[in-house]
Image (cartoon, rainbow, N blue to C red):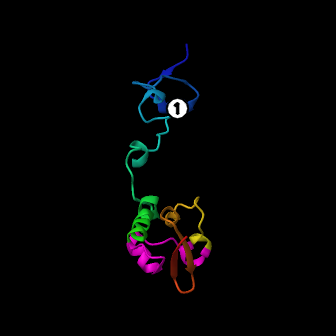
């Protein structure tokens, strides 16, 4: 019978090796077959009920809903705001695309940020002037 080495790391020497003591890597919590560790789950993945407003600098729907509440409370037919005012209301910097592309302000219900539609407004941006006018539709 061939030699059995007591140390698992000596297996590359062409001899038969003894398995490591304790549970196999595939049965250890957090370890994949082959001994690689699983990445830790993100906090939101561990608790799906948790709503994290700040996700790597990305503004989430709840923050944009602050803008919808503001427009609803204002109630005027035309509400003119600077991008800086919008930023203060939502509590987070607008993404760069809001400053560059009027399409960001499009009245598309598929856009997360288009919460103004929920309260009956359309957005008319002036990207060059960094202003937006919300018009009750």
Residue 38 at x, y percent in the picture = 47, 40
Find disc 1 in the rendering and name its residue.
Answer: 33
Secondary structure under tag 1 reads loop
Q: Which of 95 and 75 is in front in this view?
A: 75
Residue ID at (50%, 67%): 116
Residue farthest to the bottom?
129
Q: Is residue 33 above or below residue 82?
A: above
Residue 88 placement: quadrant: bottom left
Q: Can residue 18 be found in the magenta stretch?
A: no
Depth check: give the residue in front, 119 or 14. Answer: 119
Q: Where is residue 107 in the image (x, y as percent from the top left)?
A: 59, 67
Residue pictured at 53% horizontal, 86% vertical = 129
Q: Give the range drawn in magenta.
A: 74-102
Of the pair 38 and 51, the residue shown nearer to us: 51
| 87 and 52: which is toward the camera | 87
- Whether residue 74 is situated above or below residue 41 in the rendered picture: below
Q: Which residue is drawn at 41% across and 32% down?
A: 29
The number of numbered discs placed on residues in the rendered structure image is: 1
Q: Where is residue 120 in the image (x, y as percent from the top left)?
A: 51, 66
Percent coordinates x, y for residue 127 in the rendering = 57, 81
| Quadrant (top left/top right/bottom left/bottom right) for the C terminus | bottom right
């Amino acid at each position: 019978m061939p030699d059995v080495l007591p140390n698992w790391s000596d297996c590359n020497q062409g001899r038969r090796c003894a398995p490591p003591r304790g549970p196999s890597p595939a049965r250890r919590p957090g370890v994949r077959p082959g001994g690689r560790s699983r990445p830790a789950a993100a906090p939101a993945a561990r608790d799906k009920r948790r709503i994290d407003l700040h996700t790597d600098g990305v503004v989430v729907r709840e923050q944009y809903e602050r803008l919808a509440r503001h427009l609803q409370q204002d109630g005027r037919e035309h509400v003119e705001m600077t991008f800086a005012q919008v930023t203060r209301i939502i509590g987070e910097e607008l993404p760069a695309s809001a400053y560059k592309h009027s399409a960001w302000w499009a009245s598309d219900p598929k856009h997360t940020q288009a919460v103004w539609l929920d309260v009956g407004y359309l957005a008319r941006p002036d990207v060059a002037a960094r202003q937006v006018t919300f018009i009750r539709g």
